[in-house]
Image (cartoon, helix red, strand yellow):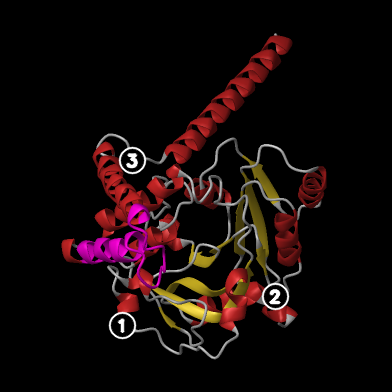
Amino acid sequence: MKNSDVMAWPLISVIVPTYCREEALRDTLVDVMAQDYPNFEVLVVDQTRTHEPATEAYLEQLTTAGKIQWFRVDWASLPGARNYAVRRSTGDIILFIDDDVQLTPGFLATHARNYVEQPDVGAVAGRVFDRMKLTESKKTRVIEYLPPEAMDPGIAWYHIDLVHTIKPQQVLTARGCNMSFRRELFEQHGLHFDERFRGSAVREESDFCLHIRQTGYRIWYDPEAHLVHLGEETGGCHDISTRSLQYQLTFYHNHFLLGLKNLTPIQALSLFARLFDCHVLGRPPCHKSGSPLKILSRAGFYFLGFLSAVWTLIKSIWDDGQTYTRLDQNARVTQASVANQSLDEQATAVSSMKS
């Protein structure tokens, strides 16, 4: 990239929500700092109560050097953290990565190139190599173009493969650990992440991406914008055990919420039927245990999740669920009020001295 081209490249806001991550977070930020892209800022939304000394020192070092903006909050919500950072970002492109990823130096430039070259692209979905699937991804399986089902919002989630697909193409959604958006989607179209997606927040990025369909922008998959997702067993979205009762309930709640919010009745029925077939009965591609007791247990969470999602939508009549955004807005109003009061007191003091 030539120095003369720097001004032509849009400012990228790299947003890293983090929760209870230590070495993985530090390694991720090392890779971000090593990017060869000339125009970016980094915002870390930290939901960790107490860090290890090495992590605390590293984050303080980067903050003092002006390399990152480090925001600490006393709550844990992935969609809430995304919204929080967007409000404080200044980039033309908003790029989200997880706190346990490995990047190549040209990662940011690849994301940006899609926006510069394609004005109708509103979001870029990058390729994701999951550490647990790296061996599998190196086998002979290759997908050039995704099947038509991958653009059907009812069943797309079982046909979108952003690991083995090697050709750039339009897609329906991105993966939350590697996705970027034009700022216009947030400011001009008023899109935001729905903070009603709970727990691991599964499907919160899919929910956001489905709303992009109404803006006229496309979501473009670029396999060259790739990263390795380490999928650490603790921290991140794993604030509750994947085997816990709460996790099971929120998993189904989030899928039903996605369908009830965004899909036609036929599309929703397709999603719910496939969800039952795969995650309850355990058929491919889920390959879960066929034990009658386990199927019965999963079915119980399936129906409880549906009822929970219905209640979430009913509750939305008087509560939109943007809990963490509201907390932030109230805090900002309070800070502004305190600042104005301080200015008034200073003005009064100055007037008294003149008198």
Label 2 neighbour load within 10 Å: few <14, some 14-19, many 20+: some
What is the chief secondary structure element of the magenta stretch?
helix
Q: Secondary structure at mark 1?
A: helix
Lateral position of residue 59 relative to residue 40, left or right: right
Magenta highlight on residue 272: yes
The residue where tag 3 is placed is 320
Where 348 falls versus 150 (above or below)?
Answer: above
Q: Is residue 8 visible?
A: no
Q: Which residues are magenta?
A: 267-294
Q: Residue at x 62, y 70 (%)?
A: 131
Location of residue 292 in the rendering, given as x and y in whole percent from the top left corner: 32, 57
Q: Is residue 84 above or below residue 108?
A: above
- Kindly indicate the quadrant of the structure image that contains residue 353: top right
Residue 250 magenta: no
Q: Where is residue 2 drawn, in percent x and y?
A: 72, 83
Give me the disc on residue 148: 1
Location of residue 97 in the rendering, given as x and y in whole percent from the top left corner: 59, 62
Question: Which residue is nearer to you in this view: 170 or 340?
Answer: 170
SS state under label 3: loop
Establish if 23 lies above or below 95.
Answer: above
Which residue matches tag 2? 104
Q: Residues within 10 Å of mark 3 (few under 14, many from 20)?
A: some
Residue type, mark 2 in image:
Thr
Q: Tell me the quarter of the picture where residue 211 sits.
A: bottom left
User: Does dot 2 land on a helix, a strand or a loop?
Assistant: loop
Q: Is residue 265 among the parts visible in the rendering?
A: yes
Three-letter amino acid code at disc 1?
Pro
Question: Residue 82 vs residue 323: left or right?
Answer: right
Q: Quadrant of the C terminus?
A: top right
Q: For the view shown, which residue lies furthest in the left direction? A: 265
Separation (CA) of disc 2 from disc 3? 39 Å
User: Which residue is more in the foreground, 108 or 263?
Assistant: 263
